[in-house]
Amino acid sequence: MYPPSTVRDRPEAIAYVMAGSGERITYAELDRRSNQLARFWQSRGVGPGGSVVLVMENNLAWPVAVAAGMRSGLYVTPVNWHLKPAELAALISEDRPAAIVTSVALAEQVVAAVGGTTDEHPVIVCADGAAEGCVEWDTALADQSTDPLETELLGARVLYSGGTTGRPKRFAQPLLGIHPSEAPRRHSGLVDKLGVGSDSVLLSPAPNYHAAPFTFQLITLAAGGTVVCMERFDAAGAMRAIVDYGVTHSQWVPTMLVRLLRLPDRESIALSPRHQVAFTSGAPCPPHVKTAIFDWWGPILHEYYGASEGYGHTYISPLEAQSHPGSVGRPLGAARVHITDADGADVDPGEQGTVCFEATAGSGDASRPALKQMGDIGYLDDEGFLYLVGRRGFMIISGGVNIYPEEIETALMAHPAVADVAVVGVPDAEFGESVKAVVEVRPGAVVTEAELIDHAREHLAHFKAPRSVEFTTDLPRLPTGKLDKRTLVDRFATADEGAGPGSSKFPDSQQLPSPSTFQGEKV
């Protein structure tokens, strides 16, 4: 992503537009403003090898901050803005940023999270106004030259993922020490399959801090295309944006597609002939959802699967999806997929095991390639198509978002009425999985389901809070005394009929995991 590459031939081309407000920025403006922000950071001692953390909602400052970091040799780190100060502080302590960009609405929690993490606090820029402890955006850019830095270096993307314990871990792409104009193509094989180019108009309806939106916005802007960014996901609004902005490409998670399919009178909704490519990732897309989208939009829905860490990707085309329903495709490029047993040995086609990507280089052992896995369980068919069947461990994927039970259990155990708790994922027709807490109450204590959900929401980002709570007097245990979560998972293996949207138990849509998934406090 280097704005001058497009400015040379098409300076007034639209780089980024907010779908709801219509606010937009041209490539020429993006070039000038990102230069100003880069120079401001430089004036504050933020230089190559430093990190800038983005903690803000989807807005027009986002591409400016990303472009400034990517042309300044910085690590650019977007983080989930729904995190509480303590959660955010852990990420800031790990990343040790030299700069942070946030918004008025989030400034207080960002400043609180920064306090006490290091002796040298990062410079915090507030993108949409004045806030205590922050430098206002207009003030930061004022009087800064619009010329590029004397020495420009390509920055690198940083994402936070998690292990089975739920502790965030930082994954940073390497700084290559090259000029931004020499940046290698990102995910070239996948980009070629999807046909992203200078005439592409990408609808990005998800939170920008997620791996896929962040990456494909970079890809589209590097190609000279236009990003149409939704302030927050709204199914009807997304369909309007596709028509209003002449969208050619759109990116989704399966939960969003379910919401689109549930629109009333959707068959009468106008479709755009320019919308030729849609793609989904984040969680396997159920075959019946793909079929319904094909029936509505035509065979334009592609799917890919892979790790944020970049171990490899698989891809399945719309045509292949019809002949291999349920598959997430075959490896792209140099990637190789292995299915291994408990000892790390490859298993035969059709046999389930741990899904691993073969490292393309640097294994250090010519006799056995290095294998990287993300905890997924699946199998390969005779043609090499990959099918995912579940997760190793008990991580929950709700609406394409990874949720870790241990963190929620810790928060619930802090409630004085809770004696013990187990958190599991239960099938959900809309979100894939939803969070359920199974709770033992202390003798003599009284607590309600709503109180425990509220307690979790006070201590965790809202999307992590249980959607339902079940009370029990005897959580199942193994002979070792440890909780037998497998028994609980098997017990709740069918969809929870009572916890769906609009049920009497949960009339408030705030109980849904949608805030994290769809950017905002309501859908």
Image (tube, helix red, strand yellow):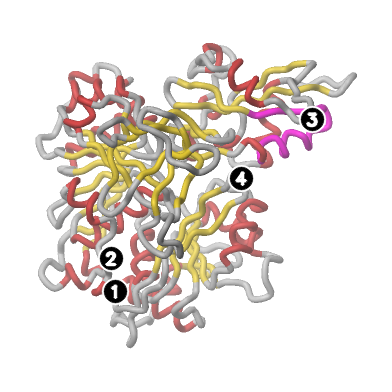
Q: Disc 1, disc 3: CB below 8 Å?
A: no
Residue segment shown in magenta: 407-423
| Residue corresponding to mark 4 | 166
Q: Does the residue at mark 1 contact the one at mark 2 (Cβ under 8 Å)?
A: yes
Q: Is residue 87 left or right of residue 58?
A: right
Q: Is residue 203 left or right of residue 176?
A: left
Dot 4 crowding, Cα within 10 Å, few <14, some 14–19, many 20+? some
CA distance separating discs 1 and 4:
34 Å
414 or 291, which lies in front? Answer: 291
What residue sits 45% from the left and 26% below the top? 432
Q: Which structural element holds mark 2?
A: loop
Contact, CB < 8 Å: mark 2 with mark 3? no
Badge number at residue 1: 2
Q: Nearer the viewer, mark 1 or mark 4?
A: 4
Left or right for 299, reference 38: left
> The disc labelled 2 sits on which kind of residue?
Met
In the picture, the disc for residue 180 is 1
Nearer the observer: mark 2 or 3; the answer is: 3
Tell me how far mark 2 sits from mark 3, CA to CA.
53 Å
